[in-house]
Amino acid sequence: MKFENFLNSLKESNETLDFFVDFEKVKRNVSKIEIKLHQLNYLIGKKDLEKAVEELWKENSSAFSILNILIAVRDNRKVLLENGEVGELENFFSSSIGVLKFLGETELSLIFQEVTNLVDFVFGVEVGLDTNARKNRTGKNMHSKIANIFRKENLPFQEEVQISELPNISLGLDENKFDFVIEAKRTYLIEVNFYNSGGSKLNEVARSYTEIAKKLNSENIQFVWITDGQGWKKAKNKLEEAYKNIPHLYNLHSLETFLQKVKSEI
């Protein structure tokens, strides 16, 4: 396949409907703090919020330790205080006075007059936070898709194979494992990825894989790179260079060529 055809056949997306939100993860995160959320529900709709906070503090002060998730923050961030000093977020939760200050300055005190259930509220917060993980899921989606293709074609493959498990291979690079390994007439060491957007990382990936191919390729071992995504159109020069130097560089459209080659060697 000519490089121009390779470039023009890159997929616009690999985002399936289950890509956008990992609801199982969302449910797990909510479940971990559900009891404390129910305890904080005591504050909902209270006209005298200060009194309600004091009452809940005396009953169970640990319930307030999860207030940060109500503003979509998981960790103990450092924040700028009114006096110009920098303090830790969790310090607000060490006293009822600190809790009231936190509720007032974040305007959560107003939210407690609007919402009806903090479990449902945090479920929505977790859905929003989960969108930050979409970038990681792009690569995982591609990995899963290739694995499913290999299974459908009944190819003998291994996943996530450490280089240390492969005899007579030493790259001396950052790579410490291959996404897939297929043992046929020769051994195919396979890396897969998908890029929706461009960036300097793509140039480095293309350069690195070109170097790996030069180090590995022999009569018995071949490096295979399966990549796709419109992000490559912003790094097409480096990709074209890799395309010229890596004999086994495929996208989802041209992958059938590789599949047929491997089948003929099994």
Image: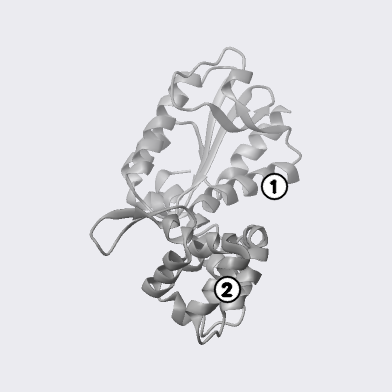
Looking at the image, which residue sits at the far right? Answer: 154
Label 2 and label 1: CA atoms lie apart by: 56 Å
Element type at marker 1?
helix
The residue to which callout 2 is attached is 55
Q: Amino acid at mark 1?
A: Asn
Q: Residue at x 53, y 48 (%)?
A: 139
Quadrant in which the C terminus is drawn: top right
The residue to which callout 1 is attached is 148
- Camera-side residue: 59 or 194? 59
Q: Position of residue 257 (x, y in %)?
A: 60, 40
Q: Residue at x 47, y 53 (%)?
A: 75
- Camera-side residue: 45 or 257? 45
Quarter where residue 206 is shown: top left
Q: Residue at x 50, y 20 (%)?
A: 216
Element type at marker 2?
helix
Looking at the image, which residue sits at the far bottom? Answer: 47
Q: Amino acid at mark 2?
A: Glu
- Camera-side residue: 90 or 72? 90
Which one is in front in this view, the residue at disc 2 or the one at disc 1? 2
Q: Position of residue 140 (x, y in %)?
A: 58, 48
Q: Is residue 66 above or below residue 210?
A: below
Label 1 packing within 10 angstroms: few (<14), some (14-19), many (20+): few
Q: Position of residue 236 (x, y in %)?
A: 35, 46
Quarter where residue 106 is shown: bottom left
